[in-house]
Amino acid sequence: MARRVAHHRERRPVEWGCVEETLHLTERLREFAAPDTCILVDCLTLWLSNLLFAGQAATQAEAGEAVDCPLFRAQTGALVDRLPQLPGRIILVSNEVGWGVVPMHPVSRLFADEQGRLNQRVAAVCDQVTLVAAGLPLQLKPR
């Protein structure tokens, strides 16, 4: 994995900065977004996973309880609310995890369901949405 990360960094242009944020993505976007910037968020899927495990959502799902995760709700809600107001260009990468078999494990099902909901909510407020499959871009929501 270290070699893979190193290779990724080597391919990255030198003028690109890198900020790693595991939970408070919207705060970081507010901090760095500017009219003359382009921000690449890679990726919403990992961020969602971090949110679900940082709160009690994963534990509640595992126990078969109703899931109530204020951190998750607050952070995803803040992102969807704030995105349209941020200056500059923001490119969000997310995985589509709902095309396969429905997972048997309750935490996996929770994750797949929430990822699908997050993708829908983010797509609704974005100016453009592109699905990339097999290296081919398909415009779902053209600019």
Image (cartoon, rainbow, N blue to C red):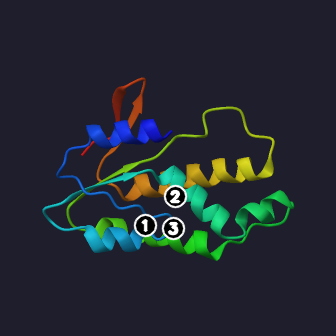
Give the numbered dot on residue 25: 1
Q: Amino acid at mark 3?
A: Leu
Q: Secondary structure at mark 2?
A: helix
**Image coords of residue 43 (percent x, y):** 44, 50
* Residue at point 79%, 51% (across, down): 106
The image quadrant that residue 86 belongs to is: bottom left
Q: Amino acid at mark 2?
A: Trp
Label 1 crowd bin: few (<14), some (14–19), many (20+), radius 10 Å: some
Q: Secondary structure at mark 3?
A: loop
Q: Is residue 65 above or below residue 13?
A: below
* Residue at point 51%, 71% (across, down): 75
* Residue at point 86%, 60% (across, down): 64
The answer to the question of whether label 3 and label 2 lie on touching residues, with beta carbons closer than 8 A, is yes
Q: Is residue 128 above or below residue 135?
A: below
* Residue at point 58%, 60% (across, down): 50
The residue where tag 3 is placed is 23
**Image coords of residue 59 (percent x, y):** 78, 64
Label 3 crowd bin: few (<14), some (14–19), many (20+), radius 10 Å: many
Residue nearest the viewer, comparing 20 with 57:
20
Q: Amino acid at mark 1?
A: Leu
The image quadrant that residue 28 belongs to is: bottom left
**Image coords of residue 19 (percent x, y):** 35, 61
Q: Secondary structure at mark 1?
A: helix
The image quadrant that residue 21 belongs to is: bottom left
